[in-house]
Every structure is written in C-alpha cells, then in structure tokens.
Image: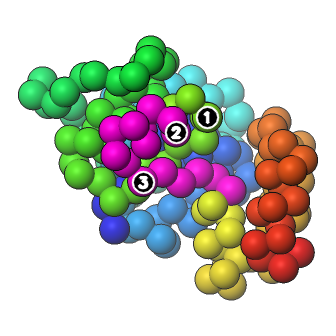
Amino acid sequence: MLAVSNTSPISNLAIIGRLEFLRRRYGIVHIPSAVKDELGALTHPLGSQRIQAALSECWLVVKPLEASVSQTLPFPLDRGETEAILLACQLNADVLLIDEKRGREAARHRGLVVAGVLGELIHAKLASWIPNVRDEIRRLHVDARFFVDEAVEKFILSQVGE
C-alpha cells in the first residue's frame, strides 16, 4: 500500500515510541521536503532520534514534487499539508496520513483516502501490536500534547471494544 504522510502522524507516533507501526503497515512512507523540514524542527529528543533513524533506514523517504502536479486546493494550507496532499496526488497514493481537519478536507476534495494517528492506533490494536488504544491516546495527550475531542475518543475506543 503506497502511503504519503504529513508531519503530525509521524511526529506524534515518534514521540510516543510507536513510529514503527507505519513501517510495519506500509513498508515505505513517502514525505515531501516540507514535511522533512517540519520534522527536523521537532524539539522532542527521542521523537527526533526515531525520525532520523527512519530516514537513515530508508523506510521514511523524501520524495520531490514534480512541477506538473496540479496545485489547486480548495483553500490555503500550511506548506507541509499542501506538499503532502500534492505528493499523494502525484504518486496516486493509496492513503494520505494527515490529522488536521482542514488538511483532511482538502485531501478528500482532491479524491484522496485519508487516515491519521488514531486510525493507525486502531489498526495496531486489531493487529495485536498493542494491548489497548486507551493507553496510547493517553500518551498522545501527555507526551505529544495531541488533542482528541472527547466524542471522537469515545468513538475510537468503541471501535476497538474499549
């Protein structure tokens, strides 16, 4: 399955020590240069170290954008989100990993299938890589300062029987 990622899923999974979930599920994850730049600015030492290891191991791959890709999005986004969406279109990706609501909306507008960090945690639970999702969400809150709406959290937990 061909995957492209924005910054948030990679950085948040790296912070909580679960970045390998992406490698196990997708094999290779492609990112544009803007996302690499944003990941390079991560101030969490262990998270940053894990990201650098993924780049060194060549399963997190920086892919350049081609000038021929249509750059039309329904509204402006930050550089990382914009490039991630455009790269997913260029590669005809099976999935774009992106957490931000407006970025997901723009990606869907371009016909992309989107997933995010919470969906990856559901997959990890269903694949028996983790015993529960609740503890992982708690770690996202505490360690990564990742906000999850209470209703969304309840829905996610209901999907895995928690």
In the rendered structure, which amino acid carries the disc numbered 2? Arg
Mark 3: secondary structure: loop
- Image position, residue 51 (x, y; %): 53, 45
Residue range highlighted in magenta: 104-118
Mark 1: secondary structure: helix
Q: Give the residue pinned by disc 1.
A: 101
Disc number at residue 113? Answer: 3
Label 3: how many residues lie within 10 Å, few (<14), some (14-19) or many (20+)? some
Residues marked 1 and 3 touching at CB (< 8 Å): no
Measured in 3D between alpha carbons, the distance from the residue under mark 3 to the one under mark 2, in whole angstroms, is 9 Å
In the rendered structure, which amino acid carries the disc numbered 1? Lys
- In the rendered image, the quadrant that contains the N terminus is bottom left
Residues marked 2 and 1 touching at CB (< 8 Å): yes
Question: Residue reaching furthest left?
Answer: 68
Mark 3 or mark 2: which comes first in sequence? Answer: 2
Q: Give the residue pinned by disc 2.
A: 104
Q: Can residue 132 be seen by looking at this rendering?
A: no
